[in-house]
Image (spheres, coloured by chain):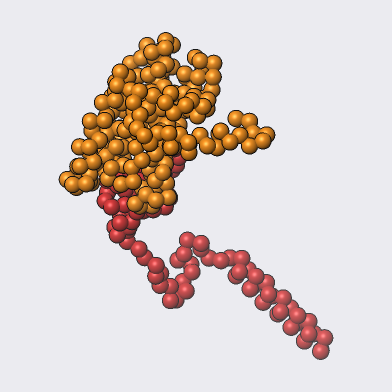
Chain colours: A red, B orange
Amino acid sequence: MIYEVFRQERKGQPLQHAGSVEAADDHFADVYAREQYGRRGESTALWIVPRSAVMEIHEFVDELNRNYHRVDGYPLKEKLKEARDRAVSAKSADALSAGEG
Amino acid sequence: MDEKVQNTLLEIADDELILGWRDSEWTGIAPLLEEDVAFSSIAQNEIGHARALYQLVARERGTTADALAFDRAPDEYRCAPIVELRLLDWGQTIARHYLYEEADAIRLERLKQSDDSEIAGLAAKIDREEAYHRMHAQMWFDRLQGEPRFTAALDELRPQTAVLLDSELRGEHTSELPELWEEMTMVRRSQPAGTKW
């Protein structure tokens, strides 16, 4: 069985995925995870989770491209660039028409 | 540190060195990859414990840990025969590991009571690492108990564990020790030109 191992480097920090161990049962997973992720003072805590207990989600539907819902927010830089380009091309179009006149 | 205490430390150091050597023979060929890592690490720990114990004795005798570990003749070693055996069966290896840890725990408890604070301190330090070894041995014991091959190995090896706890019983060696010693000290004895150790 595969177990996923999460480790906390210092108290108060979030537990982060460290890797996995293969073990026959929980008891073996406990010993192997301690051996590989815990006993050189590199962790203050471990979470050992059977991989089968982990719910995985890969698909995130965003069909309408509603990017203002996303944590990275509204891409202001891009919008500004678009606006600037528009302004420049409007100006040059004005200049062109003025020259003709 | 009197002669008797030095000899006791040497006995334990020799046990740990030779067992570490034997256990390390599983590196790369243990039954499972995770076990390979765990058991190799245990083997390395045992050799580390041997080094720390040799260092204490070496200081008393005006020599070095390396000289004690590698420069004595095979019959000068004080290790117990059980650690010398080259066991090619995993069940037997785990049986020895389990029995050894059992005896080692008793022995370390004794050392922790030593009047010499350095010895007591080192024993406590070693014991903290041995706790992992015992956990590992117990896990395999729980898994294999009831398996006829494992039970037979325990029955066969158990009588040999008395030597681990009694200096009076030491001094006998198996016929396997000289060959192990040859391999173990080969590089050190070869002294390529210019090497210093």
Q: Which residue lies most toward the front here?
A: B175
Residue A57 quadrant? bottom left
Give coordinates of residue B98: x percent, y percent: 28, 36
Q: Please state which of residues A52 and B124 is positioned toward the viewer in this rendering.
A: B124
Instruction: Give the image location of residue A34, x and y in percent.
Output: 37, 42
**In the image, is residue B119 above or below residue A84?**
above
Front residue of B183/A31: it is: B183
Quadrant for residue B154, please give it. Answer: top left
Residue at 25% across / 35% down in the picture?
A: B157
Quadrant location of the C terminus of chain B in the rendered image: top right
Does the image show residue A72? yes
Q: x, y (%) of residue A88?
A: 72, 76
Q: Is residue B194 left or right of residue B135?
A: right
Rendering quarter of residue B41: top left
Q: Foreground residue, B127 or B164?
A: B164
- Tell me which residue sits at (55%, 34%) in the image: B188
As displayed, is residue A77 above or below residue B87?
below
| Residue B165 x, y percent position in the rendering | 29, 23
Q: Is residue B114 left or right of residue B162?
A: right
Asked if residue B8 is positioned above or below residue A83 in the image, the reply reads above
Q: Residue furthest bottom?
A: A100
Q: How many marks?
A: 0
Assign the N terminus of chain B to one quadrant of the image: top left
| Residue appearing at x 21%, y 46% in the figure | B149
The answer to whether residue A7 is visible is: no
Answer with left or right where residue A1 lies relative to residue A35. left
Residue drawn at x 45%, y 34% is B181
Figure check: B40 above or below A80: above
